[in-house]
Amino acid sequence: MVVLERITAEITAYFRALDESATLRHHFRHADEDGGLWYVEAVPDRDALIVIKQVELTSAGQFHWYSWEHLEDEHGGLTDQAIDPEVDPLEAISAEEFQRVWAR
């Protein structure tokens, strides 16, 4: 249990540091095969785009928010995979659109 707590603390610290030090942020939306929408805020880190905030709007109208402050729950969690807008099916959106969803 101590090892799991240490790993969780390290992951939380990593995402928090990215969020607090970011000067450039990218925002995307993705529609999944179930009719849900995913909104992400990502920042560059070592030649990759790392998601630091993520909102899922399910096809049933439920919202699930993830960030360093809430990494996971019974519905899912903040992705631990870098994203590539040139490969992943993502649509660039404005920071304002992301913030409207994030603030719900």
Image (tube, grey):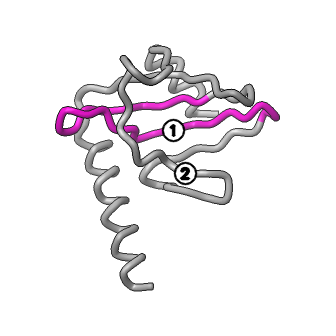
Indicate which disc, 1 or 2, sits on the residue closer to the N terminus: 1
* Residue 33, numbered circle: none
In the picture, the quarter occupied by the C terminus is top right
In the rendering, at what x and y percent does residue 57 appear? 68, 33
Q: Residue at x 27, y 44 (%)?
A: 18
13 within the magenta span: no
| Mark 2, other Cα within 10 Å: few <14 / some 14–19 / many ≥20 | some
Q: Mark 2 points at which residue?
A: 77
- Magenta region's main secondary structure? strand
- Residue type at the position of mark 1: Gln
Q: Name the residue under label 1.
A: 54
In the rendering, at what x and y percent does residue 31 appear? 63, 23
The extreme right residue here reads 60
7 lies left or right of 89: left
42 within the magenta span: yes
Answer above or below: position of 28 versus 17. Answer: above
In the rendering, at what x and y percent does residue 52 appear? 39, 41
Q: Which residue is drawn at 58% across and 33% down?
A: 103
Answer above or below: position of 5 versus 13. Answer: below
Q: Residue at x 35, y 68 (%)?
A: 9
In the rendering, at what x and y percent does residue 79 appear? 47, 45
Provide the residue span drawn in magenta: 38-61
65 lies left or right of 95: right
- Residue type at the position of mark 2: Gly
**Residue at disc 2, secondary structure:** strand
